[in-house]
Image (cartoon, rainbow, N blue to C red):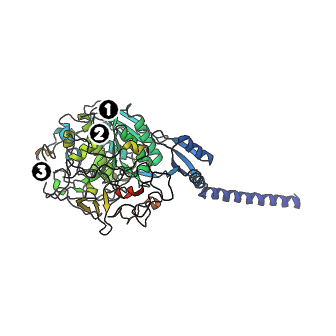
Amino acid sequence: MNLNSLKKITIIRSALSTLLLLSVAAFLFISNSPNLHKGSYIVQGASKPTLISAIESVGGEVVHNYSVIQAISALLTNQQADLVRNNHPMIRLFSDEKVKLSAHKLHAKSGKQADERNTYFPTQVGASQLHSQGITGNGIGVAIIDSGAAKFDGITKNSVGKKRKIHHHSVLKGSKASKDEYGHGTHITSLISNSSTTYNSNGEQVDSYNGIAPDVELTVVKAFDANGSSTYSDVLKAIEYVVENREKHNIKVLNLSFSAKPQSFYWQDPINQALMVAWQEGITVFASAGNSGSEAMSIGVPGNNPYVITIGATSDNYTPFDLSDDFVTSFSSAGPTVEGFVKPELVAPGGHMQGLMSHKSKIYKDYPEYADGNGYFLLSGTSQSTAVASGVAALMLQNDPYLTPDDIKCRLISSALAGTQGEGELSYSIFQQGAGMINAPWAVASDKVGCANQGMDIANEINDSQHYAGPARRGEDSGDFYILGVEGFEWDGLYNKAHLWPQAHLWPQAHLWPQAHLWPQAHLWPQAHLWPQAHLWPQAHLWPQAHLWPQAHLWPQAHLWPQSNLWGDTVIWEDAHLWPQSNSFLDMGSDINSVSFINKWIEQE
């Protein structure tokens, strides 16, 4: 080989090396460039064809066209998203955020042992009393959006040992709803429907079960993966499936044991929008308050939806037959919501709850010390308390199949047992315990109607012409939260452990509250309502840059501003406009200062 050939080979090798380095650099640049990485969005607007055209015109990818709300999901780079926003100002892009299941974080176990079987919760809420009367949820369909449900006999069979009607569906590609790799969904499903019988202290079998409603029909929709995570888009697909199959699967109740940080007002949130459709279609929706701690304004999505029934968690303090040391858990999230609604509406048992879980699931493998060796696993969370409430609704519907979601909400709230100190003083704020503990027998026996969601029109919410706010305020000087125009509900927004019902005990036969009230006049706010009917922001949208709190942004980085004031003691927006630099919506004019607020489930004694 001559010298010129060697030079040519050297030059070619050098060029190839340079080209290879440039290719790697280009690949790394493309991989890490925020303008080229595609993010997932929920895209909302007035016209589906316009939405699709807007996404495709900038080179984005349409992933799913939702039937339950006016939206699509799409993949867009940052640059493409900016183009959509600039070219179509009436289109709203909602980040497809992660959603987590609402089981409280497990820590190294100490003190009480997991092998102390704690399936007393049906007795604690009075469901056992109804079981003995033949009220077991028979003929009522309950849908559960979660991580799936494993095949335990207590789930697949009803109380007489026959095969239960159960429908499995997964919105996750390549994953079966009848397999629960995470474990949470099985646990929740069993709290609602476990048909295995219970025993008394003498080891004798009794007419009660380890689930609240052992004879319900089940629809298990898998939207959460093996790590307990999901996204807005997958949850929306799951809700869509429930709504579309409500008649086919006889779905009357929907359990949502998950929570996400609010990114917007409740009516702008796609999950909340879908749930309002479900509610309107006759499905009673239960949502967990969340487990972010019981300080003020910590309620997550979809618990911040004013129509659905939001559930906080209590603990029996490992003494299920002694009410005097029960308490609202410190992890249970509290209200009010950003829009001023009182949340949660109710509380239910959610501390150290034992339900079924496969030994193959992630939670079981990660924390085997919480298993009892017989298929039961101990978990705490507002997820668990939400499952209890969903089961109680099924009992109510068996007794009266014609109840609407508003009826169920009204009866649950009006029959709840408020935690008090015995002199009428609440043990916990209404922003922590709502109307109080669910009481299944009282709810089933109730004939109350018309006391929930009054003054609000869900049809107008769905068509985006009318939205509402509740009566909660925060004092600008004191910082305390209170109810506008009503004394006695002030709260400093902090968690202070107390006992729900000091000096209270169970009656014989281990039934809570049998045919009696713990205290006379133990119902909060019966037969009265606060605030005349009024609407907030009719036929209009809040301008995105409007602030409810001075000198603060609502959701920087998707978090609520920690030290904001909830509208203070003065009139709303006295020196501001709801929709600055725009005359395209309804002109509120001087009526802005006469806007009144609604939260019709609150009743005054």
Q: Determine contact: label 2, label 1, CB under 8 Å.
A: yes
Q: Answer yes or no: is residue 377 visible.
A: no
Q: Is residue 244 shown to the viewer in this render?
A: yes
Question: Label 1: few (<14), some or many (≥20) within 10 Å?
Answer: many
Identify the residue at horizontal 31%, vertical 40% (top origin).
405
User: Of circles 2 and 3, which is in front?
Assistant: 3
Q: Is residue 23 left or right of residue 263?
A: right
Q: Which residue is mark 3?
A: 520
Which residue type carries mark 2?
Ser
Residue bearing mark 2: 193
Q: Are marks 1 and 3 in contact (CB under 8 Å)?
A: no
Q: Are marks 2 and 3 in contact (CB under 8 Å)?
A: no
Q: Which residue is mark 1?
A: 164
In the image, residue 65 lies at what x, y percent? 51, 40
What percent of the width, then of the height, locates residue 268? 44, 50
Q: Is residue 37 left or right of residue 127?
A: right
Of the pair 63 and 10, the residue shown nearer to us: 63
Q: Mark 1: which secondary structure?
A: loop
Mark 3 surroundings within 10 Å by alpha-carbon count, few (fewer than 14), some (14 through 19), many (20 or more): few
Q: Is residue 3 left or right of residue 36?
A: right
- Under mark 1, the amino acid is Arg
Please give the label number shown on residue 36: none
Q: Secondary structure at mark 3?
A: loop
Q: CA distance from mark 2 to mark 3?
A: 33 Å
Q: CA distance from mark 1 to mark 3?
A: 41 Å
Of the image marks 2 and 3, the number of the one nearer the N terminus? 2
